[in-house]
Amino acid sequence: MIYLDYAATTPVRKEIIDTYTKLLNTYYGNSDSLHEIGRNSSKLMEQSREMIAQLLHVNKEEIIFTSCASESNNYATKGYALHYQTRGKHIISTCEEHSSVHNSLEQLKDEFGFEITYLPINKDGVVSLEDLKKALRKDTILVSMMLVNNETGAINPIKECAEYVHQNSRAAFHMDAVQGLGKIEIPIECVDMATFSAHKIYGLKGSAILYKKQNVELLPLISGGQQEFGLRAGTSNAPCNIVFAKTLRLALEEQKKAYEHVLKLNQYLRREIENMEDLVVNSPSNASPFILNFSDLKIGSEIMLNALNANGFAVSAQSTCSSKSKAISHVLLAMGLGETRATHAVRVSLSHLTTQKEVELFIETLKEIHNDFRTR
Ligand code: PLP
């Protein structure tokens, strides 16, 4: 099977498996225990927090370990909004967010009386500063915007948007940077909160962080013990949190090389797909090269995915979290690409592990499937 679904998740690096296995055996102590076995776990976990902070150029106290990016997004939205609700009940986000942001905001609206403005996206899949300017109000307390869209790879103008918000309001700015980490530059210095996940950068599933500026307060969503600065109770997953630092270090060390490699593969795929009859590329040309979204106008997503799967290729149609709930891409619809493209979309996502041979075989198979369906 040829795996071209790295935006859904990545295989774990061998170095990470080796380190994690050692940690599981040795650092089993509860990091809150006062004895030496517990203290050893705690010490290493805090060293990992420190290293993550250094790699991201932030302070150690600003890194919160969580179980997944969905959880980080829940903290950044619900945790933030519920803490600051006396300041205002208006939140701005975009129509292209991951379900963990979108559904948290819908919950704030339905259960807690917040008002949410979802910014539209243009044909290139990004929000415009002008729309943000119009939406920002006196009672806006939070803006949540993704850096890289998980379906198209489109990159939002975070720096401009966050600067405008900070200069013109007291609202905090949260960035879901899950699809950007280890791939493109992260404008962390511009935002108040940011979400990152380990399993998208060849690390463990069930491992993520929330970056939160020191002056930002959150309502704890899990009450109990004092773990994670009192924000997230429950015995820390020390081995998992410890290995995050190594996962991040390796991803950042290889970022430039991976980017250049993937860019070439992406350009090849784009060229080939654009030259095929009835096929259109949906990702804008300046998107992150790690994601390429296209539609075969003659073959719906589900049929195409099954045919590719039967031929040994693993790809997605849209966000994996929405794959079982609906067959239409709300992101492509919001880009104004129409229903056919939105129901016929295929997302190919690439890695430093992807080879030129793999993408050539993919194109060959795509042509075969397309011709086969056309002549039926
Ligand atoms: N945000 C974005 C942009 C994503 O692509 C994903 C996963 O696909 C998530 C959040 C959720 O990540 P996790 O699986 O770690 O909860």
Image (cartoon, rainbow, N blue to C red):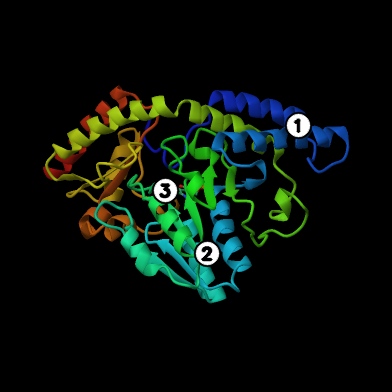
Residue 8: name its quadrant: top left
Q: Nearer the viewer, mark 3 or mark 2?
A: 2
State whether residue 244 appears in this view.
no
Q: Quadrant of residue 351?
A: top left
Please, is residue 118 above or below residue 355 in the view? Answer: below
Horizontal side of residue 107 vs 296, given as left or right: right
Residue at the disc numbered 3: 147
Is residue 327 left or right of 140 when viewed as pictured?
left
Q: Which residue is at 49% across, 57% downward?
A: 173
225 relative to 15, above or below: below
Find the distance from the CA under tag 2 to the CA under tag 1. 42 Å
Residue shown at 80% from the left, 32% from the top: 40
Residue matched to label 1: 27
Question: On residue 170, which mark appears?
Answer: 2
Q: Are marks 3 and 2 in contact (CB under 8 Å)?
A: no
Q: Amino acid at mark 3?
A: Leu
Q: Position of residue 111 (x, y in %)?
A: 56, 74
Q: Amino acid at mark 1?
A: Tyr
How far apart are the two marked residues, 3 and 2, measured between alpha carbons?
A: 21 Å
Q: Earlier in the sequence, mark 1 or mark 3?
A: 1
Q: Residue furthest bottom?
A: 113
The circle drawn on residue 302 is none
In this orientation, does residue 183 appear?
yes
Mark 1 surroundings: few (<14), some (14-19) or many (≥20) residues within 10 A? many
Q: Position of residue 224 (x, y in %)?
A: 76, 58
Mark toward the viewer: 1 or 3: 3
In the structure shown, which secondary structural element does the residue marked by tag 3 occupy?
A: loop
- Identify which residue, 308 or 101, lies in the foreground: 101
Q: Nearer the viewer, residue 48 or 235?
A: 48
